[in-house]
Amino acid sequence: MKSELVNKILEGDVLAAARLMRGIEDEVTGAVGALESVYLHTGRACIVGMTGAPGTGKSTLLGSLINIFRKKNMTVGVVAIDPTSPFTGGAVLGDRIRMQSHGVDKDVFIRSLASRGWKGGLSKATVNTIHVMDAMGKDIIFVETVGSGQGEVDIARVADTSIIVLIPGMGDEIQMMKAGILEAADIFVINKADREGADSLKIWLETMLEMRTRPPDRWKPSIVLTEANVDKGIEQLAEEILRHRDFLDSSGELKKRRKERAKLELMMAVESSFKNYIERMDQDYLEKLVDDLVHRKTNPRSAASKIIELSKK
Ligand SMILES: Nc1nc2c(ncn2[C@@H]2O[C@H](COP(=O)(O)OP(=O)(O)O)[C@@H](O)[C@H]2O)c(=O)[nH]1
Ligand SMILES: [Mg+2]
C-alpha cells in the first residue's frame, strides 16, 4: 500500500509526517499500513542518540547542533523523549525562526514524544517516529533521551552514534560504572565545562577508557568539552559526529549495527504481534490454560506452544 499520505511524507511534507506520527502515538489502525510502506524508504539517515541526566544541557546542545548541520546544508530531525522539559529548539533555534520570513525552517523537524510509562527504555513509537523522519529525507536525526540506568543501552542499539552528556561535579562516574555507560558511548560530551571539575572528569574518563581493552581497529570514544549555552565546543562536537559516521562507513561497522537494529526491530515486532494475539484470542481458552497451569496439569512451555499453534490458524 502506498497511500497519498505516504507519498507526501516521502516528499518531506511536514503536516503529513506529523499526522502519521500522531497516528503512531495514538496507535490508530491506519497508521500501521502507512508505516509498513514508510519503512521501505528508510535506512539513509544518520541516527544520533543523545543521553544524559535531566539538566545536563542536551536540549541546548541540540539547539546549537541544529544550526551547525543546517549550515552544512544537512536536513535535521529531532526526537525528544523528555518527560521534564519539552524540546522547543531553545533560544538559538528561536532566533533562527524569527529571522526567517517564511516561519519555521522546513528542513528541521522536531518532535517531542510523551514518555507514556517510559522508564528509560525505547518505545516502539520512538523507533517508528525515527523511521518517519528518515523517510522524509532527513540527513541526520537526533534522539534525546533522559539517561537512567538501562536507557542508554537501548538508545545505543538504535543509534548509529551514541553521545552521553555529562556535567562536572555530579558524581556521574559511579553512575556510569553501574550502568555500563562506558561501553555504550561513542562520544562523551562534558557540558557546562565552565564549571569546576570539567578537567578532572575528562582525566577520569580518559583513564577509564584507557583501561578498557579495545582492538586497534575499533573506534576510540572521543571526549568533547562544551559550553552549550554560549555555543562553545559545538563545532568540534559536530566534527566528531561526522568523523564517527565516516568511521562507521569505512570500517563496515555501520552494516553490522544496521543488521543488529533490523534484528531488534524484528524481535520487537514478534513480541508485539504475540501480545496482540493474546489480547484478542479466546479469553475463556486462555483462562483454561492458566487454570491448567495452576493445577499443574501442564507447564508454561507446553501452554505457550498451544497458543503459538492456535495463532497460526
Ligand atoms: N552554565 C552552563 N549552563 C548551561 C550550559 N548548557 C546548558 N545550560 C543550562 O542548563 C539548563 C538545562 O539545559 P537543557 O538543555 O534544558 O538540559 P536537558 O534537560 O539536558 O535538555 C538550561 O538552563 C541551560 O541554559 C553550559 O554549558 N553552561
Ligand atoms: Mg531536554
Image: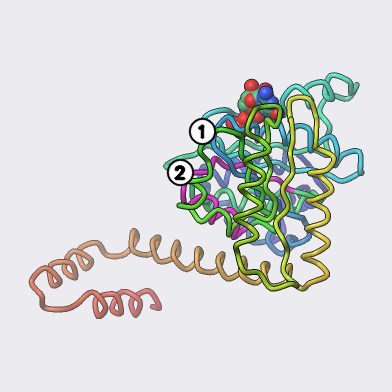
| Residue at the image point whose x is 78% and y is 33% from the top | 64
Quick check: is the Cβ at mark 1 less than 8 Å away from ligand 2?
no
Q: Is residue 252 above or below residue 54?
A: below
Query: Which mark identifies residue 54?
Result: none
Q: Is residue 220 left or right of residue 106?
A: left
Residue bearing the label numbered 2: 118
Label 2 Cα neighbours within 10 Å, binned few <14 / some 14-19 / many ≥20: few
User: Three-letter amino acid code at disc 1?
Assistant: Pro
User: Three-letter amino acid code at disc 2?
Assistant: Trp
Quick check: is the Cβ at mark 2 less than 8 Å away from ligand 2?
no
Q: Secondary structure at mark 2?
A: loop
Task: Report if residue 45 lies within the magenta region.
Answer: no
Q: Is residue 94 left or right of residue 264?
A: right
Q: Secondary structure at mark 1?
A: loop
| Rendered location of residue 141, percent (x, y) | 73, 48
Q: Is residue 87 visible?
A: no
* Residue range highlighted in magenta: 141-158
Marks 2 and 1: CB-CB under 8 Å? yes
Quarter of the rendering occupied by the C terminus: bottom left
Quarter of the rendering occupied by the N terminus: bottom right
Residue bearing the label numbered 1: 83
Front one among 239 and 254 = 239
Q: Is residue 256 left or right of residue 94?
A: left
| Residue at the image point whose x is 30% and y is 79% from the top | 305
Front one among 209 and 189 = 209
| Rendered location of residue 284, percent (x, y) | 20, 63
Q: Is residue 310 above or below residue 258?
A: below
| Rendered location of residue 236, percent (x, y) | 83, 43
Residue 153 picture quarter? bottom right
